[in-house]
Image: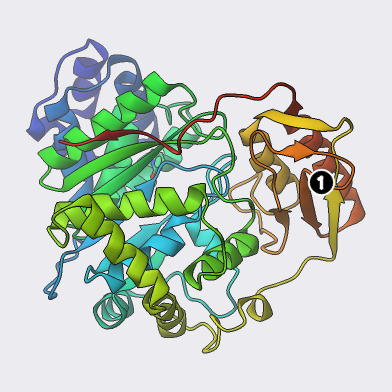
C-alpha cells in the first residue's frame, strides 16, 4: 500500500485499518517512508484525530517497531509516568517505594521537554550513574534491586524516536492521539503489566486547561487498557511547583531526603502516595486504600525504599555511599542567593511555567536538543500559593553558575509570583480515572 494513499485517507477523515497503520509505521521505522510523508501523516492525524481502535493500532505498531522486553519475575511489573511539570521528582521517590512493596519497576524515563524537567537529566546529576545501560544490565538491576530508572534505549520503540523528532519540528506534538501512542508505545515496549499515569493540569503543565487534561487522561487510559496494559490515571494540580525546588541536582536531593524521612509532609508526598496506592490496588498487592497507604508509608519509615534507591545507584555505577551524603556526589553551584518580592504580601498565584523557564535560563535545561546542561543550578525554597512573602522570607533561593544568569533568573522569578488576595486552595489530586 502506498504511504501517500494512507495519508490521503487520514487527511479526508477516514478511519485507518490496523494493517494500514502497521504498514505505515513499518515504513517509518525502516526509512522507506520519507520525512515529508511522516510529517504529512502527523499533520493529518493532528487535524482529523484517531478513533480509539486506530490509536490502539498505532500504539501497538510503534511498540512492535523494536524490542519488547519480557520478564519472568516473582512480582508484578509496574510503572508510573507523568506528563511533566515543575518540581515533579515523584518517579525518583515512587520507584523504590513500589519495589519495597514487592513490585518490579523497569522505568524508562525521558529528558526535559519544553519548560519541564526530565527524570533522566536529574539522574545524570549523580556522579557515575549510568542512564544508558544495555538491556542485560537494565534487566539485571530490575531483577536484583527491584527498580531501575534509565533512558530510552535505541532498540525500544524506535518508531517513536523518529516520529517524535519529526513532530517536534512540524508543530504536531500537541495531538492527543500522537502523544498517547508515543508515551504508551515506550511503556509497552518495557513489558509492563500495570501503569499509573499522572496527567498534570495547570499553569506549569502542557495541558493547562482541565478539559484538555481530562481528554488526554481519558485517551491514555482507554488506549492503554485496549492494548492490554492495565492503567489508571490521576489528574493532578500543577498550578504551583510540586516540590519546593526545581533543577536537576536539587530535585535528586529532595528525593533522597524524602526517602530518608527528612522532609515534612507536602503536596509531593501526597501525590507520590496516591500514585503508589493506584498501583498497589491494580496489582492486588493491597485490597484497600488504607492498606496500600500503610504499605507505602512503611516502605519509607522502615528505610527500605531509601536502601533500594541507594542499591539502584550503586548497581548503575554511582557512589556506594550516595544515600548517606547525596550532596557530596553532585555538582554544587557557584552562587546561592535569595530573591525577594518587591512588595510584601500573600502569594495569590504562580506562573509555574515561568519557573521552569528560569531554570532553563540558569542553564539547567536546554534551548536546543544538543545543549549541555548544568546540573547544579536551579531554584530551592520556593514559596507555594498563599504563603507570605516579606523582606525576611524570599520567594526562592537561586542556585546559579554566575552573576549574569542569577540576575536573569531573578527577574523571571519575581514576575512569576503574583502577590494579592488569598486564593482557593486546590487539592493536589483533582480527579481519578479508571478503565
Ligand atoms: N512525552 C512523550 O513521550 N511523547 C509525547 O508525544 C509527549 C510527551
Q: Which residue is mark 1?
A: 394
Report whether residue 175 is seen: no
> Which sits in the foreground, 165 or 81?
81
Residue at (53% x, 80% y) in the render: 323
Task: Please indicate whether residue 211 sits to the left or right of residue 370 in the image.
Answer: left
SS for tag 1?
Answer: loop
Colour mapping used in the image: rainbow
Asked which quadrant contains residue 153, the reply is bottom left
Residue at (43% x, 49% y) in the render: 270
Ligand 1 occupies quarter:
top left
Q: Residue furthest top?
A: 12
Q: How many marks?
A: 1
Q: In the rendered view of the protein, which quadrant contains the N terminus?
A: top left
Residue at (66% x, 75% y) in the render: 327
Residue at mark 1: C-beta within 8 A of ligand 1: no
Q: Position of residue 303 (x, y in %)?
A: 42, 78
Task: Please indicate whether residue 207 sits to the left or right of residue 112 in the image.
Answer: left
Task: Please indicate whether residue 113 sits to the left or right of residue 177 in the image.
Answer: right
Task: Please indicate whether residue 109 sits to the left or right of residue 398 in the image.
Answer: left
Q: Position of residue 226 (x, y in %)?
A: 11, 38
Q: In the rendered view of the protein, which quadrant contains the C terminus?
A: top left
Report whether residue 134 is seen: yes
Q: Indicate whether 178 appears above or below 122.
A: above
Residue at (49% x, 32% y) in the render: 206
Asked which quadrant contains residue 184, the reply is top left
Q: Position of residue 133 (x, y in %)?
A: 39, 75
Q: Position of residue 231 (x, y in %)?
A: 20, 45
Q: Indicate whether 244 appears above or below 38.
A: below
Categorize mark 1 by other alpha carbons within 10 Å: few (<14), some (14-19), many (20+): some
Amino acid at each position: 500500500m502506498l504511504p501517500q494513499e494512507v495519508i490521503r485517507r487520514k487527511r479526508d477523515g477516514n478511519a485507518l485499518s490496523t494493517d494500514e497503520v502497521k504498514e505505515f509505521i513499518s515504513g517509518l521505522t525502516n526509512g522507506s517512508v520519507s520525512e515529508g510523508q511522516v510529517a504529512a501523516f502527523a499533520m493529518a492525524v493532528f487535524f482529523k484525530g484517531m478513533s480509539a481502535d486506530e490509536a490502539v493500532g498505532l500504539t501497538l505498531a510503534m511498540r512492535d517497531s523494536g524490542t519488547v522486553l519480557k520478564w519472568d519475575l516473582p512480582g508484578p511489573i509496574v510503572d508510573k509516568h507523568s506528563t511533566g511539570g515543575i518540581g515533579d521528582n515523584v518517579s525518583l521517590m515512587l520507584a523504590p517505594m513500589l519495589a519495597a512493596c514487592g513490585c518490579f519497576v523497569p522505568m524508562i524515563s525521558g529528558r526535559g521537554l519544553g519548560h519541564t524537567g526530565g527524570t533522566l537529566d536529574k539522574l545524570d546529576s549523580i556522579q557515575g550513574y549510568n542512564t544508558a545501560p544495555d538491556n542485560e544490565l537494565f534487566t539485571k538491576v530490575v531483577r536484583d534491586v527491584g527498580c531501575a530508572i534509565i533512558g530510552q534505549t535505541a532498540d525500544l520503540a524506535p518508531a517513536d524516536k523518529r516520529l517524535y523528532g519529526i513532530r517536534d519540528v512540524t508543530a504536531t506534538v500537541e495531538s492527543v492521539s500522537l502523544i498517547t501512542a508515543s508515551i504508551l508505545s515506550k511503556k509497552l515496549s518495557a513489558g509492563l503489566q500495570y501503569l499509573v499515569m499522572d496527567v498534570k493540569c495547570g499553569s506549569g503543565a502542557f495541558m493547562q486547561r482541565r478539559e484538555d487534561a481530562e481528554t488526554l487522561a481519558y485517551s491514555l487510559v482507554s488506549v492503554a487498557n485496549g492494548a492490554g496494559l492495565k492503567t489508571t490515571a490521576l489528574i493532578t494540580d500543577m498550578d504551583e511547583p510540586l516540590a519546593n525546588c526545581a533543577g536537576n541536582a536539587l530535585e535528586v536531593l529532595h528525593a533522597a531526603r524524602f526517602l530518608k524521612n527528612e522532609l515534612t509532609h507536602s503536596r509531593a508526598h501526597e501525590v507520590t502516595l496516591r500514585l503508589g496506592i493506584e498501583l498497589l490496588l491494580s496489582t492486588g498487592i493491597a485490597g484497600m486504600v488504607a492498606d496500600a497507604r500503610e504499605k507505602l508509608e512503611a516502605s519509607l519509615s522502615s528505610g527500605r525504599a531509601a536502601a533500594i534507591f541507594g542499591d539502584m545507584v550503586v548497581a548503575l555505577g554511582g557512589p556506594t555511599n550516595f544515600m548517606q551524603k547525596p550532596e557530596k556526589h553532585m555538582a554544587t553551584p557557584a552562587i546561592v542567593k535569595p530573591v525577594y518580592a518587591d512588595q510584601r504580601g500573600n502569594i495569590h498565584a504562580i506562573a509555574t511555567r515561568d519557573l521552569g523557564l528560569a531554570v532553563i535560563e540558569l542553564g539547567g535545561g536546554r534551548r536546543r536538543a544538543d545543549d549541555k546542561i548544568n546540573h547544579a543550578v536551579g531554584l530551592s525554597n520556593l514559596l507555594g500559593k498563599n504563603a507570605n512573602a516579606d523582606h525576611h522570607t524570599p520567594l526562592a533561593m537561586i542556585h546559579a553558575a554566575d552573576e549574569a544568569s542569577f540576575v536573569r533568573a531573578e527577574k523571571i522569578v519575581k514576575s512569576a509570583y503574583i502577590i494579592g488576595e488569598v486564593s482557593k486552595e486546590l487539592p493536589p489530586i483533582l480527579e481519578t480515572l479508571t478503565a
